[in-house]
């Protein structure tokens, strides 16, 4: 059974800039820069038939970008988990077109019998997974890096990724890509 998700790749130059934030936080499991991405919809472990249908149906969602690249900006660093931090991330500045694309992938998942996503779409690039790292240490790490990122790039496609069954995912493999505008 493949473990699938749709997302946007991060250009190598932007990944290189994000990689400068690696380190300085004991207990963090840093994501490899080659695996940085923005998840649109995690589909999970699906059988081969559902995987094939998802791959075919995703082609219908690329038209939402209107044939244009998505202009995206990573604007600040953050943490998921509050008092029990579980991930450090670079936040993607709000973008209506990106949200529409994620909503289309959510609808597609439901049409194919997958359970609804219960979390609100919060586009981000995960930089590190945290387990047993104190909120105080994470807060200090963030406070030392409390300045705007302003990392801008264009995404001209989204991709269907597969991942191996492991803690923290990665390495990720591109199963199919979907250029905006066909």
Image (spheres, rainbow, N blue to C red):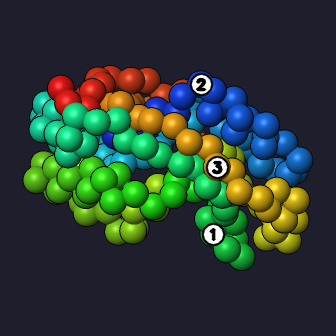
Q: Is residue 71 left or right of residue 130?
A: left
Give the number of the disc on residue 150.
Answer: 3
Which residue in the rendered view is the most extreme toward the bottom?
Answer: 83
* Mark count: 3
Q: Is residue 156 left or right of residue 82?
A: left
Report the residue marked by disc 2: 12
Of the two numbered discs 2 and 3 on the same chain, state the one appearing first in sequence: 2
Give the number of the disc on residue 119.
Answer: none
Question: Residue 50, can we see it?
Answer: no
* Residue located 79% across and 37% down the image: 20
Report the residue marked by disc 1: 81
Of the two numbered discs 1 and 3 on the same chain, state the one appearing first in sequence: 1
**Circles 1 and 3: CB distance less than 8 Å?**
no
Question: Residue 173, can we see it?
Answer: yes
Would you call the spot at circle 1 few (<14 residues within 10 Å), some (14-19), or many (20 or more)? few
* Residue located 54% across and 28% down the image: 11
* Residue located 79% across and 62% down the image: 146
């Amino acid at each position: 059974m493949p473990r699938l998700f749709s997302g946007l790749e991060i250009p190598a130059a932007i990944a290189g800039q994000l990689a400068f934030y690696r380190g300085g936080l004991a207990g963090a499991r840093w994501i490899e820069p080659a695996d940085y991405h923005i998840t649109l919809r995690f589909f999970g472990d699906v059988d081969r038939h559902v995987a094939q249908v998802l791959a075919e149906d995703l082609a219908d969602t690329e038209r939402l970008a209107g044939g244009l690249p998505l202009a995206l900006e990573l604007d600040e660093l953050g943490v998921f988990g509050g008092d029990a931090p579980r991930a450090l991330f670079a936040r993607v500045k709000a973008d209506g077109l990106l949200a529409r694309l994620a909503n289309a992938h959510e609808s597609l998942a439901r049409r194919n019998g997958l359970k609804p996503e219960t979390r609100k779409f919060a586009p981000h690039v995960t930089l590190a997974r945290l387990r047993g790292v104190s909120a105080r240490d994470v807060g200090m790490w963030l406070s030392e890096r409390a300045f705007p990122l302003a990392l801008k790039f264009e995404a001209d496609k989204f991709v269907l990724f597969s991942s191996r069954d492991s803690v923290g995912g990665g390495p990720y493999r591109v199963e199919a890509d979907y250029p905006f505008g066909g």
